[in-house]
Image: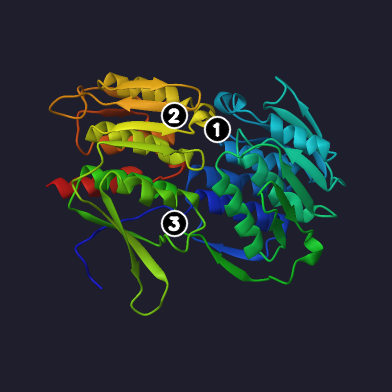
Amino acid sequence: MKTNDLHIALPASKSLSNRWLVLNHLLGRPFTLRNLSDSDDTALLQTLLAQLRRGSTTDFFCGNAGTVARFMMALLAITPGQWSLDGDDSLRQRPMGPLINALRAMGSNIQCLGEEGFLPVSIIGHIPQHKMVEIDPSESSQYVSALLLIGPLLPQGLTLTLTDRPASRPYIDMTMTVLQRAGIATSVSPNRRVYRVAPIASLPSVSHSSISIERDWSSAAYVYAAAALLPHHRMRMQGLSLSGSSQGDKAAAEIFSHLGVVTREVRSPYRKDIRSITVEGSGTHDNAIEYNFIDNPDLMPPVLVTCAALGVKARLKGVKNLSIKECDRLQVLADELGKMGCRITRTASEMRLFPYSGTQAVKHTDIQVDVHNDHRIAMSFGILTLLFPDIEILNPASVTKSFPAFWEQLELMKQLKD
């Protein structure tokens, strides 16, 4: 069916790709993984896993990839051998303590070579015998996912108790969905505090099964932002579904509805499955929004920047963990939006935006945006160039961490203005 929609090519989900890669490695690679993410993070993880299989190195360098480092730490802890794990200066500042302590409680031998709770670490890998462990997931859900993924390899499986409310809970749900789809028995207590993963002995035969990775909802958020800024133009994203997705960032559809974006699911004319998503800005939006991003922190930067462009007052809560990402995203957002005339206030857990009040949403546009090598900051401010072409994004190549084709897709969106 031909349409006049602008077709935007999204990358495959980095989060799903990385989970399937680790689990496939642990299970002896019974799955054929199709449509893997072409992001830097996924390419790095593939390289490290290949090196581990070949035994070509005992030193694993994770760059600035926090998910890769946390998944590799858990994997190396249960892989016999002596290993070292490190990252760049940015990654060395990101906390690893809760995961290190949980692995130690399970019987793993992990030594911090610098500051306690941070990379670099040395690891003596062996299969731990302890089934039950507790972890504080309030800093990162990646700690939980890393442990859940190695659960099938433990002799008695894993019983994991969360001692606090997790950040980004949907990513834990995604990990459980991946385990279940792989045929591994799992369960969650009614209060969602205790997670259980059965040992691999209970795994049915899954040889030659094919897994296709769905498109990335986190990347779709930038298309939503573009739709809000360029109303009455419809954009289509193939391979994306609201009703059938395990990705928590599909919440972008609900959040951006308050900024005037209408979402429609397009079904295949031949099958009942969802084929694509279309988005279109209505040209109207709320004057102020309030949202808690504790489950969807990656959506906060594009939402905040879109609010600034539209002149929408925003109170965004549950953002504490954004200060320990690739950069301190809260500070960088405040600094760069401040250059544009927006007033930002922040506390430990929320940020408020008071856009410039005048004939335009922001006051100054002839500026350089320092993205601090953060892909989500680069893409969020990149969308602003749809309205303000004088904005210059420093280090635009940082987007390859998650969405390598972002700038090419943005150029397609710019054609809508012609």
Mark closest to the chain's N terminus, 1 or 2: 1
Residue 410 lies, with reference to residue 385, above or below; the image says below
Q: Residue at x 72, y 55 (%)?
A: 26
Nearer to me, 209 or 131: 131
Nearer to me, 101 or 210: 101
Q: Tell me which amino acid carries mark 2.
A: Asn
Determine which of the numbered discs, if any, sits on residue 373 in the image.
2
> What residue occupies the far front of the structure in this picture?
191
Q: CA distance from mark 1 to mark 3?
A: 23 Å
Query: Left or right: 320 with respect to 166?
Result: left
Determine which of the numbered discs, if any, sits on residue 215 in the image.
3
Secondary structure under the numbered disc 2 in the rendered image: loop
Q: CA distance from mark 3 to mark 2?
A: 24 Å
Query: Left or right: 269 with respect to 104?
Result: left
Q: Tell me which amino acid carries mark 1.
A: Asn
Mark closest to the chain's N terminus, 3 or 2: 3
Q: Nearer the viewer, mark 1 or mark 3?
A: 3
Q: Residues within 10 Å of mark 3 (few under 14, many from 20)?
A: many
Q: Residue at x 27, y 28 (%)?
A: 392
For the residues bearing labels 1 and 3, Cβ distance under 8 angstroms: no
Q: Position of residue 277 (x, y in %)?
A: 34, 60
Q: Residues within 10 Å of mark 2 (few under 14, many from 20)?
A: some
Q: Residue at x 28, y 19 (%)?
A: 339
Q: Residues within 10 Å of mark 1 (few under 14, many from 20)?
A: many
User: Which residue matches tag 1?
Assistant: 64
Q: CA distance from mark 1 to mark 2?
A: 10 Å
Determine which of the numbered discs, if any, sits on residue 262 in the image.
none
Secondary structure under the numbered disc 3 in the rendered image: loop
Q: Position of residue 244 (x, y in %)?
A: 47, 64
For the residues bearing labels 1 and 2, Cβ distance under 8 angstroms: yes
Query: Left or right: 122 with respect to 376?
Result: right
Secondary structure under the numbered disc 1 in the rendered image: loop
